[in-house]
């Protein structure tokens, strides 16, 4: 729930333990957290791309019209929703090696809340300078890594030493997903118009 956002950012140890007792479902997670939080980078990117335009810090910017930005936003949004489930599935796959692995439901819920700093970092897309978005993405990733290492034992119940391997693999996979999404963001939001023209001409 959105009430967990502040807790994860301010006191993650306590928040993870509290969330572990809630018995939340994947449907509830998406309805009350992921669907709303994932809209933050999408809406901000829509506004920034149509009103300001992508830029590298110079005078030249690439601006999308409202319709192209809308289509790009839909694709971006669906990609984020799928990425949350994919990361949760990776955590579940890695955790199967342990005697009492957490369920897929718990792993996906963990991934949904784990992505909170990345969702919040999307606010910078209101002023979409490429270097600024990259910096925000890196900062968001760093805090996500912290939540990951704290949350594995507190939320998933995996021993601290054992969770290091799962956390490291999950973090590596998350970095790959982030890089793919950053690339897709620049392509869809910054150069979407050119791509659409190329596809139409071919």
Image (tube, rainbow, N blue to C red):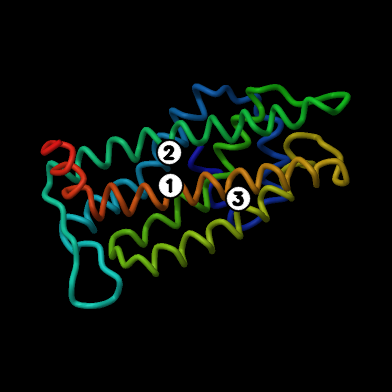
- 71 vs 154, nearest the viewer: 71
Q: Residue furthest front?
A: 202
Report the Cα–Cα distance between label 2 and label 3: 20 Å
Q: Report x, y in % for residue 124.
A: 36, 62
> Contact (CB < 8 A) between labels 1 and 2?
yes
Displayed quadrant of residue 20: top right
Label 1 secondary element: helix
Q: Which mark is residue 181?
A: 1
- 69 vs 114, nearest the viewer: 69
- Residue identifier under label 3: 8
Mark whose residue sits in front, 1 or 2? 1
Report the Cα–Cα distance between label 3 and label 1: 23 Å
Name the residue rendered at 11%, 38% in the picture.
201
Q: Looking at the image, how many numbered discs can be counted on the residues?
A: 3
Name the residue rendered at 60%, 31% in the picture.
109
Q: Report x, y in % for residue 117.
A: 52, 53
Report the Cα–Cα distance between label 1 and label 2: 8 Å
- Number of residues whose C-alpha sits closer than 10 Å to that of mark 1, classed few (under 14), some (14–19) or many (20 or more): some
Name the residue rendered at 68%, 33% in the picture.
91
Mark whose residue sits in front, 3 or 1? 1
- 18 vs 133, nearest the viewer: 133
Q: Which mark is residue 80?
A: 2
Q: Earlier in the sequence, mark 3 or mark 1?
A: 3
Note whether 191 is above or below 91 in the view shown.
below
Label 3 secondary element: helix
Quarter placement of the C terminus: top left
From the viewer's perspective, tell me whether residue 115 is left or right of residue 76: right
Q: Earlier in the sequence, mark 2 or mark 3?
A: 3
């Amino acid at each position: 729930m959105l009430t967990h956002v502040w807790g994860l950012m301010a006191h993650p140890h306590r928040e993870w333990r509290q969330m572990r007792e809630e018995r939340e479902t994947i449907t509830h997670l998406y309805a009350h957290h992921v669907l709303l939080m994932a809209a933050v980078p999408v809406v901000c990117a829509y506004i920034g791309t149509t009103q300001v335009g992508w830029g590298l810090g110079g005078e030249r910017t690439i601006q999308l019209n409202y319709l192209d930005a809308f289509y790009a936003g839909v694709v971006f949004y669906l990609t984020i929703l799928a990425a949350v489930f994919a990361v949760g599935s990776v955590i579940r796959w890695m955790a199967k090696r342990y005697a009492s692995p957490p369920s897929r439901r718990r792993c996906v819920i963990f991934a949904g809340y784990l992505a909170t700093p990345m969702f919040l970092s999307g606010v910078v897309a209101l002023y979409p300078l490429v270097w600024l978005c990259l910096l925000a993405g890196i900062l968001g990733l760093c805090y996500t890594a912290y939540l990951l290492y704290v949350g594995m034992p507190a939320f998933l119940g995996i021993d601290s030493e054992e969770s290091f391997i799962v956390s490291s693999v999950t973090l590596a996979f998350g970095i790959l997903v982030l890089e793919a999404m950053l690339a897709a963001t620049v392509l869809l939001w910054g150069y979407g118009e050119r791509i659409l023209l190329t596809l139409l001409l071919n």
